[in-house]
Image (spheres, rainbow, N blue to C red):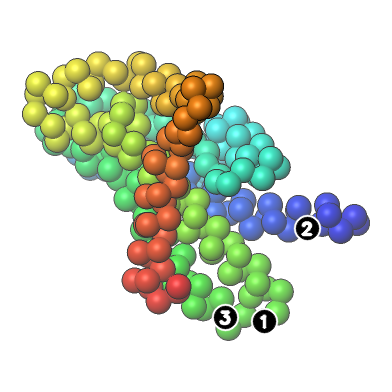
Amino acid sequence: MDPKLASTIYAASTWVIPILLAITLHEAAHGFVAHRCGDDTAWRLGRVSFNPFKHIDPFGTVVLPGLLFLLHSPFLFGYAKPVPVQFSALRHPRHDMVLVAAAGPATNILQAFVAALLIHAAAFLPGSAGQWTQATLENAIVINIVLAVFNMIPLPPFDGGRVAVGLLPDFLARPLARLERQGMLIFIALVFILPVLSAELGLKLDPVRWLLGTPVEWLIGLILRLTGSD
């Protein structure tokens, strides 16, 4: 086998398990907390499951991360099929919406923390098995923190936007909630269009760095320090 191809396959193999677990548990957590709070929609549809095939979105879970990997993107992320939640069915809709939305990112942070702890055990595995395991765990830390930070952007329909709507006073929550349909377009404009326009004006604006890079680096550093893995 061509050494370059072998190296690419090896590197990709260290991302597959972390991405599947990060996305699957994120979505399952939303459904589980919604079920505990009174909405059994996701439960009835079988979405409260550790089976990744219940959550995989062909583009968001497979194509997008694969393209970012092949293009040597500085960060990888993806998404799954959103878990359906009927917020009106929750026992305390506004309060419970915060819990349901925060459950996914919280699960990702927990996974990153566990992966950082397991890095200590990887040192006891022999040779190439230990190297592969350590690389996979390091990737698990990265992908889970990226997903947590990405989803906690305080703009609907992201989880962070729903958390903000649930916590802010009405006069701020209502106009923010109305951005649900336009939220993704606003995000795309900030991330992809704003840098191009600013470059034309001789400015260097880097919203990806502000929204993802800095908080991701800080959280990863904190987890590594707390687990003694730095």
- Residue 100 x %, y %: 26, 39
The answer to whether residue 77 shows anywhere in this view is yes
Q: Secondary structure at mark 2?
A: helix
In which quadrant will I find the N terminus? bottom right
Q: Give the residue at mark 2.
A: 7
Going by the numbered disc 3, the residue's amino acid type is Ala
Give coordinates of residue 156: x percent, y percent: 31, 26
- In this rendering, the label closer to the viewer, 1 or 2: 2
| Quadrant that contains the C terminus | bottom left
Name the residue beneath numbered marker 1: 126
Q: Is residue 77 left or right of residue 218?
A: right
Other residues around mark 3 within 10 Å, as few (<14) / some (14–19) / many (≥20): some
How far apart marks 3 and 1 lie (CA) works out to: 8 Å
Mark number, residue 11? none
For residue 10, which quarter of the picture? bottom right
Label 3 and label 2: CA atoms lie apart by 22 Å
Q: Position of residue 97 (x, y in %)?
A: 21, 34
Please state the horizontal and vertical placement of residue 208, each as a whole percent of the image: 46, 38
Give the CA separation, mark 1 to mark 2: 20 Å
Side (left or right) of 180 relative to 67: left
Lower position in the chain sequence, tag 1 or tag 2: 2
The mark found on residue 123 in the picture is 3
